[in-house]
Image (cartoon, helix red, strand yellow):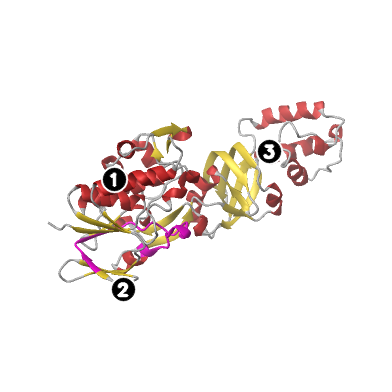
Amino acid sequence: MKNRIAVIGGGPAGMIAAATAGALGKNVFIFEKNNKLGKKLFLTGKGRCNITNAGEVEDLIENVVSNKSFLYSAFYSFTNNDIIELLSKFGVDTKIERGNRVFPVSNKSSDVIKALEKYLSHEKVEIVLNKEVKYIEKRDNDNFRIEFSDSEEQYFDRVIIATGGKSYQQTGSTGDGYYFAQNFGHTIIDLRPALVPCEISEEWVKKLQGLALKNVKISAYVGKTKIFEDFGELLFTHYGISGPIVLTMSNYINRYIGEKINIVVDLKPALSDEKLEARILRDFEKYSKKQFKNSLDDLLPRKLIPVIVELSNIDEDKFVNQITREERKRVINLFKNLRMNFSGFRSINEAIVTSGGVSTLEIDSSTMESKIVKGLFFAGEVIDVHAVTGGFNLQIAYSTGYLAGLNC
């Protein structure tokens, strides 16, 4: 039996892969170039760690953006309940919050990392920190030679690449795994930022920096074709827009980069045009003797009012009782169709995950083994799979890591 296993990368995928293989009695080494495991995991959920999502497995699959079908075996082999039970065994109690997001009761991502470290220790995995892999090759005698940055060489029967993507590069995710995979003949699907804020060309957006809008609807169009629509929270920044629905939107529009993308925000999605007009008429009657700039306080956050006034092309000092029907229609249109021009994404280093990676066509979805190189396995973000926010991407890491560790 081939028993000497190298796991490259100490994130959630690598840790689960290593411990799973260790539980089978294999001699497992996990190599992490940082001085600690789970550096990126520590940042997830704003330091609270959105461990997974408590939805049904079909819900997990539905929230995957790229190559959903590739993950069926992984998600059913190691479920969200499995990771919750595993963490409980090693001292982490969990809770479910809005959107079925699962967090540690302590709200500390460090507790999740400690639990996974206990799991590794329990399965006698050797953890090697500050050890950077520079090169991997398969030798004629069917084993792998790994060369490290300190010029040391070691030999292994199986290798699991769990190096992450290229996002949050300060955590060590610098794309090493893509380089290793390419050297073995694997195809790397174009790398793009996913779950990333968007830059907007309109100057007025900068005036709204720091403003968060809840319960709005955002849509994205290429020409007249709608490519995305969702409801939720939007945050204006000095460069454009962010917030949960914007991060989700980025997953769907990154395949249209190079085309003209228009973003439309409905500030009052719960109101039809007719109901909104009736509401505005009531407010205009209430404030009929006030200037236009002072008539929208009941409908909009104060910071947004000057922008809407400016975009309406109505004189801000005009009295409300002098506003024409045509001008009122323009205001309604702005409320329902606040339009922006997408000008680009923030850098991949600001993205939560990486879109693209090792082609799923070249990986066995039931084992995570390379179809090109026997004994080579992949797990986590290095593979061309990613999902929306809400714990789904971490579940991808655990589930693919489990299959890799089980079959290596």
Which residue is farthest left? 1
Which numbered disc, 1 or 3, marks the residue closer to the eye? 1
Choose between 374 and 134: the one closer to the eye. 134
Say whether marks 2 and 3 touch (CB < 8 Å): no
Residue 273's disc number: none
Q: Position of residue 233 (x, y in %)?
A: 57, 39
Residue receiving disc 2: 151
Amino acid at pointer 1: Tyr
The numbered mark, 2 or 3, whose residue comes first in the sequence reads 2
Separation (CA) of disc 2 from disc 1 = 30 Å
Neighbour tally class for label 2: few under 14, some 14-19, many 20 plus, Cα within 10 Å: few
1 vs 365, nearest the viewer: 1
Residue 28: image quadrant is bottom left
Q: Say if mark 1 contacts mark 3, CB within 8 Å.
A: no
Q: Residue furthest bottom?
A: 151
Q: Tell me the amino acid under the disc marked 2.
A: Ser
Mark 2 element type: loop
Q: Can I make out residue 64 in this image?
A: no
Q: Which of marks 1 and 3 is nearer the N terminus?
A: 1
For the C terminus, give its image quadrant.
bottom left
Residue pictured at 22% horizontal, 50% vertical: 22
What residue would you read off at disc 3? 335
Q: Can residue 59 be seen in this view?
A: yes
Give the percent coordinates (x, y) of residue 219.
Answer: 57, 44
Quadrant of image for the N terminus: bottom left
Give the quarter of the image for residue 134.
bottom left
Stretch in magenta: 154-178
Dot 1 crowding, Cα within 10 Å, few <14, some 14–19, many 20+:
many
- Locate residue 259, reporting x and y percent: 55, 58
**CA–CA distance between discs 2 and 3?**
62 Å
